[in-house]
Amino acid sequence: MNILFLYHLTIDPIKGGIERVTNVLADYFGKRGYKIFFLGLKKSSPIIDGRQYYLPDSKRFGAKQNIQYFLYFLKANRITIVINQGGLGPQSSRLAYYCHEQNVPLISVIHNSILARINNFSSAYFNLFKKYNLIWVLKIINRLNIKIVLLWMYKQKYKKHFKELCKNSHFVVLLSDEFKKELQFFTGKKINVNTVSLPNPVSFNVKTDISQKKKELLYVGRIDFYQKRVDLLLAIWSKLYKWYADWSLHIVGDGPQLADAKQLSVKLKLENIYFDGFLEPQVYYQNASLFCMTSSYEGFGIVLVEAMQYGVIPFAFNSYLSITDIIDDQINGILIPPFNIDQYVFELERFMKDDSLRKSFAMETIKKSQKYSLDKIGGEWVSLFNNLQTDGLKL
């Protein structure tokens, strides 16, 4: 069986969550005899991977030569399944639909919440409104509950895409059962039987010694003030660092607002904070005790589960649907009401003060992470492939 992953960027596992998950699954499938190919729109990383190929026109998926190349690629490499990793995007999905011309089945994956950016509009767009001194407009939007209008507009814009996605995909994969209600918001009917939930698998096989943990808080991910809200993390640290001089905050990652984050750190006169850049995060997971996520929304948040594998206790705003799949509040992690900074600080302090509390929670995080083992999730994917072969190509 030859499998093609279609995505708009290079599959570089240290660049982002979708890239990491794609690479992990590809390696898993490869070890089981599947031949794997990656096809991207544009080269976003210098990484060299023999499985990576690119469309000839890097500007848009729908270019005529891209369609021709896609069809040629399927035939030349005897592709038996296409996995569209850009199920949120109409453009990549429309190219993926051409696989039907060669009777190749299609699995489309929606890697994020569809509605969270609207449901959490105030948080996601706060810094944009602040930049143009329009916070007062945001307050009016909140007061008048204009979010209802925004949801209606969003539905009008994307309902055709999601209906087409369900119609043209043999399976639509969501990261949580919780996201089915969001998809139904667009399709206007009960979810089709071809819609399944498969969470992302963890990336590493590890043995953790929690007795070696250091007094470190950790963030791993893209640096931005829009979705990831790293600015909130810095605000949280500003309320802690003076009182906990033996603790430190490590920020691992890069992104469009890294310079802004560093500048804000200087403005807040933060100490014991380290911007470590794009690095493999395993050593940081090994050392850290507490993991901080401050996102406005996520699709799944695989870094949370990766951290939990290493006994790093996760803290996150309860700001997206699948977060409750990962964190059982006050059992294996902490969920904070969105976007309550003071409560976030309170919960962190509770753990920073108490060694025994950290140790007991760390053991629980490791147990919970096993739910997302690669063997378990990868096996579910293989079952999906087998169902395609058994059931044929009916849409």
Image (cartoon, rainbow, N blue to C red):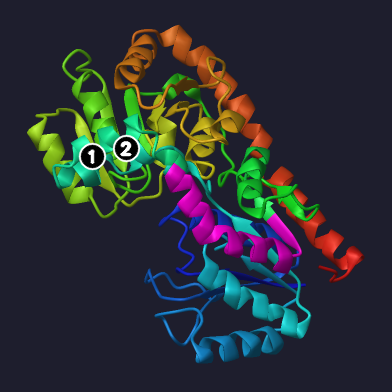
Query: Which amino acid does the dot numbered 2 rest on?
Result: Ile
| Residue at left offset 85%, top offset 59% | 387
Disc 1 vs disc 2: Cβ atoms closer than 8 Å? Answer: yes
Q: Is residue 373 visible?
A: no
Q: Magenta includes 166?
A: yes
Q: Picture coordinates of residue 294 (x, y %)?
A: 37, 33
Residue 233 in which image quadrant? top left
Q: Nearer the viewer, residue 347 or 308?
A: 347
Query: Which amino acid does the dot numbered 1 rest on?
Result: Val
Residue 98 higher or lower than 282, as above or below: below
Mark 2 lies on residue: 141
Q: Magenta includes 341?
A: no
> Is the magenta region chiefly helix, strand or loop?
helix
Q: Picture coordinates of residue 371 (x, y %)?
A: 67, 34
Q: Is residue 168 visible?
A: yes
Residue 109 in which image quadrant? bottom right
How packed mark 2 is, by other alpha carbons closer than 10 Å (few <14, some 14-19, many 20 or more), is some
User: Where does the magenta region start and end?
Assistant: 149-172
Q: Picture coordinates of residue 8 (x, y %)?
A: 48, 69
Q: Quadrant of the N terminus?
A: bottom right
The mark found on residue 88 in the picture is: none
| Residue at left offset 51%, top offset 82% | 62
SS label for mark 2? helix
Mark 1 lies on residue: 137
| Residue at left offset 22%, top offset 28% | 235
Which residue is situated farthest in the right direction here? 390
Q: Quadrant of the C terminus?
A: bottom right
Q: Picture coordinates of residue 327 (x, y %)?
A: 55, 26
SS label for mark 1? helix
Residue 5 in which image quadrant? bottom right
Residue 217 higher or lower than 240, as above or below: below
Q: CA distance from mark 1 to mark 2?
A: 6 Å
